[in-house]
């Protein structure tokens, strides 16, 4: 359901070694060559992206697809670089007050756009505890290598592994009860039967129902957030306006309204940064 994992731990070690030897720009050149190769061999993904480009209003070309893959590759590269050199990254925050100034905790709605895995860098200087739910698809050897890297990660960032099932659900509830924030992916279904439909890029789209339902049940607002790569070692953290729970409405109606507002926010981000949508499969068919 996305780019097949043709990368491996050795590949990431080589890229980081190149980065340490000749710097960021030198590593970027190698990554572009790798991206071009991947663009050549990922024929299924390339076909799926043509449908996405049509929906977002972009003319398809092979070079555009290469550039798209390159953006994805650079985001992965940055993900590892931030583990060893987080202070070299510049973070701009847009509509930050929607998140920072609040009277209660929030559900942060994430999607596979931009460098969501670098959320901890964007928040590391804030005195907040954020629980990020994750079902990371990177190979176990790559994740093990990533965790072995020395980094200045904020102690206020906690990861909830969705693969742990009931334990993960309990951790989410406990975090909300303690007044802490929980970040949850909206654009991937954890359970294919648990979805909420909303209009997205002029097409009815299934979104993960769980975060909207948790927000309604616990009466907490939601805020969309995207970590967008705007240049070398530069990111823009874009927050939506608060998506509030309306308890005066029935549950399903209130959830549908929330999903619609989030879909509108996500669509606006994607139309601005179409190359940073990283669902490399037939998103709507799936």
Image: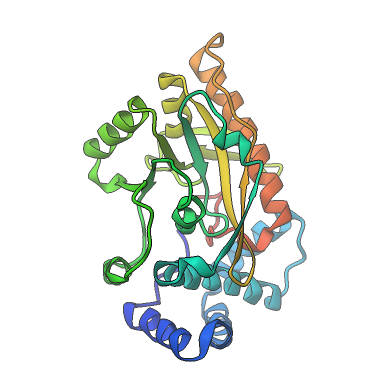
Q: Is residue 44 visible?
A: no
As drawn, 155 above or below 12: above
Indicate the quadrant where residue 33 lies. bottom right
* Percent position of residue 249, x then y: 56, 11
Question: Is 198 or 160 nearer to us in this picture?
Answer: 160
The answer to whether residue 188 is above or below residue 137 is: above
Q: How many marks?
A: 0
Instruction: Residue 36 in the image: state x and y as whole percent.
Output: 58, 83
State the image coordinates of residue 178 (x, y, percent, origin top left). Answer: 33, 28
Closer to the camera in the image, 212 or 4: 212
What residue lies at 52% left-to-right and 12% top-to-bottom? 247
Task: Left or right? Give the position of 189 relative to 259.
Answer: left
> Would residue 99 be seen by someone viewing this image from the given angle?
yes
**Is 147 left or right of 52, judged from the image as shown?**
left
| Residue name at image x 55 percent, y 56 percent | 282
Direction top: furthest residue: 248
Residue at (61%, 24%) from the top-left corner? 257
């Amino acid at each position: 359901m996305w780019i097949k994992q043709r990368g491996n731990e050795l590949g990431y070690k080589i890229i980081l070694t190149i980065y340490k030897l000749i710097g960021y720009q030198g590593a970027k050149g190698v990554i572009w060559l790798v991206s071009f190769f991947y663009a050549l061999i990922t024929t299924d993904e390339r076909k799926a992206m043509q449908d996405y480009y049509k929906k977002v209003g972009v003319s398809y070309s092979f070079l555009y697809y290469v550039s798209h893959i390159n953006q994805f590759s650079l985001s992965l590269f940055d993900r590892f670089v931030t583990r060893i050199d987080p202070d070299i990254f510049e973070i701009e925050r847009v509509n930050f007050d929607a998140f920072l100034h609040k009277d209660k905790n929030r559900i942060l709605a994430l999607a596979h756009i931009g460098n969501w895995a670098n959320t901890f860098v964007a928040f590391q200087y804030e005195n907040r505890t954020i629980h990020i739910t994750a079902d990371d698809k990177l190979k176990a050897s790559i994740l093990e290598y990533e965790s072995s890297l020395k980094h200045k990660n904020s102690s206020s960032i906690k990861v909830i592994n969705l693969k742990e099932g009931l334990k993960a659900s309990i951790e989410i509830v406990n975090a909300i009860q303690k007044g802490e924030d929980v970040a949850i992916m909206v654009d991937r279904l954890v359970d294919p039967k648990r979805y909420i439909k909303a209009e997205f890029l002029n097409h009815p789209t299934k979104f993960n129902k769980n975060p909207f339902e948790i927000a309604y049940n616990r009466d907490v607002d939601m805020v969309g957030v995207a970590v967008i790569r705007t240049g070398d070692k530069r990111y823009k953290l874009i927050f939506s306006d608060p998506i509030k729970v309306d308890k005066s409405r029935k549950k399903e109606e209130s959830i549908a309204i929330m999903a619609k507002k989030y879909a509108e926010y996500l669509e606006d981000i994607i139309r601005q940064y179409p190359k940073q949508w990283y669902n490399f499969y037939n998103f709507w068919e799936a």
